[in-house]
Amino acid sequence: MLKEAIYHRPKDAFAYAYDERTLHIRLRTKKDDVDAVYLLFGDPYVWKDDAWQFDKQSMQKSGCDALFDYWFIAVQPPHRRLRYGFELHAGEDVLIYTEKGFYKQAPTDDTAYYFCFPFLNRIDVFHAPSWVKDTVWYQIFPERFANGNPRLNPPNTLPWGSVDPTTTSFFGGDFEGIIAQLDYLVELGINGIYFTPIFKAPSNHKYDTIDYFEIDPQFGDKQTFKRLVEACHAKGIRVMLDAVFNHSGYYFAPFQDVLKNGTKSRYKDWFHIREFPLQTEPIPNYDTFAFVPEMPKLNTEHPEVKQYLLDVATYWIREFDIDGWRLDVANEVDHQFWREFRQAVKAIKPDVYILGEIWHDAMPWLRGDQFDAVMNYPFTNGALNYFAKENVKANEFAHTIVNVLHNYPQNVNEVAFNLLGSHDTPRILTQCGERKEKVKLMFTFQFSFSGSPCIYYGDEIGLTGGQDPLCRKCMVWEKEKQDRDIFTHVQKLIALRKQYRALRFGEFHMLEANDKTNHIAYVKTYDDETIVCLLNNADTSLTWTVPFSLKDKTVINLWTNECITEQTMNIEPYGFRMLLVQPTSAV
């Protein structure tokens, strides 16, 4: 056994409280190096005849990637405290792995050898809103969704969808337009809307905020927004807003005061200014988002800034009953601010959803004291590379997905925000070379994966477009110009996801990943529900053998509602099967 590959640490994704009674424990070993792993565990205060007493239980292999195998077990310590180690088997060899290193036999003279979970404190358990597991999100870029009140149009507004958008063009999208199209969203089946920023700002994207307490007049007023939220709630749709707290806009009043008064400005410490007077060329001499001079970075350590932003966050929850905050550029804001942010918003609405925009490993923000979830871009990039661009094969994709699932605790994965496209990425149909069968296959994976899926407006009817700003085209409302085939496909996936708990929050296990045929198969299980999915990511047909015996089982094709009686089936190019597996006695 390669000792250098064996890894465990009693925190984060390797040992964590899943709920108030249950601990999840993981171990990593070299791929195909270990035959079996057992957890040695017990209460640190249970001794007999000067020997520590422990139990031994088999761990299950939960996945593998190109380099490692991962092992998993759930235990419920009766007194909520645990000392533990691992017994590894490879052929005739046995190895004991503890916090202090490796041994041939399990030490019993002292518990200090072993890994320690001191106490499962309820307040330390990661808690996210339970409703998120049942939510299908729909992202709306308000300026481009629907124009319901032309009287609100900004100057030089262009006719709806008349030309491709530029970074500065306006088409007049507003709240009245969204309200008028809520029945469309109900028909699709979504039950959560994520709005990109709606606050007063000069740009079409509104990430350059002027006033965090005011609605941009292009979209409407506060009364109209309240009507929008109430209409959404009446239709069972949650509402999440976008908070840009990393930076303000150039015309934000405190920043304008600094520009005017320099070192004498009472707001000079609200920002990260390196020298006076302020200048923007060749690069700003104050910190910004990227090097964008119109987006000066806020000093969230400053007590006044902190209080101002916390007042903003609580105001929109208290006065308008929003259900969530998506936090822009969240990784560049200090952790202490986010801890206080969580405490402030949860005090007003305990089940509010806190979603951070982080494109990389986000474990430091997901320990229960800051965010409920992050935008799951590792999932996004893996899916795009495999389904859309086809620059990785099935095995590499399977390894990516195993990594995605093992990078975070299970209770974090259950509420992950899984997106395929957004206002920051090219349209998925464009990335798929405008082959809608690939888009449909990618949606099939997204809606059968663990977490909460999100649709970027228009992807469900085949909108195209490259990188920003072309990915922000106007929504198409003429049915004859929509791709209704993609729409009905997504609609059916949402309906199936709502019907079957295994699709919503069942455990995910990869069954097959075949580079030669480029297909994958995986299973989702929850209580007595088992659903097996097969995805043929190739332009040729696939002859697939169901990877289990059909004897004493009833297998239903959920897409056609047909009963499967043959062990082998033919799968069309870029086709799929979604099979509900039940014992015959249960049918």
Image (tube, rainbow, N blue to C red):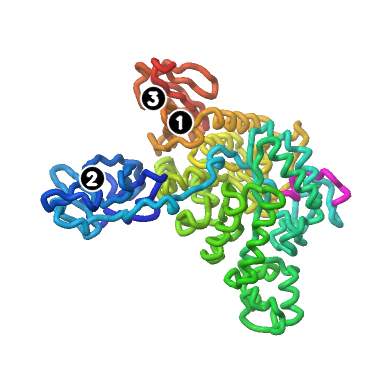
578, above or below 358, in the image:
above
Which disc number belongs to residue 196? none
In the image, 442 versus 250, the foreground residue is: 250
Question: How far apart are the two marked residues, 3 and 1, measured between alpha carbons?
Answer: 10 Å
Q: Which residue is mark 1?
A: 534
Question: How far apart are the two marked residues, 2 and 1, measured between alpha carbons?
Answer: 29 Å
Q: Position of residue 335 (x, y in %)?
A: 51, 64
Within 10 Å of disc 3 (Cα), the crowding (few <14, some 14-19, many 20+) is: few
Mark 3 or mark 1: which comes first in sequence?
A: 1
Secondary structure at badge 2 equals loop
Segment colored magenta: 141-152
Question: How far apart are the two marked residues, 2 and 3, measured between alpha carbons?
Answer: 29 Å
Tell me the residue at 73%/60% (across/down): 213
- Three-letter residue code for mark 2: Val
Q: Position of residue 339 (x, y in %)?
A: 53, 61
Which disc number belongs to residue 34? 2
Q: Quadrant of residue 185?
A: top right
- Three-letter residue code for mark 1: Leu
Q: Which residue is mark 3?
A: 545
- Left-right relation of 27 to 158: left
In the image, 485 versus 492, the foreground residue is: 492
Q: Position of residue 451 (x, y in %)?
A: 51, 42
- Three-letter residue code for mark 3: Thr
Secondary structure at badge 1 equals strand
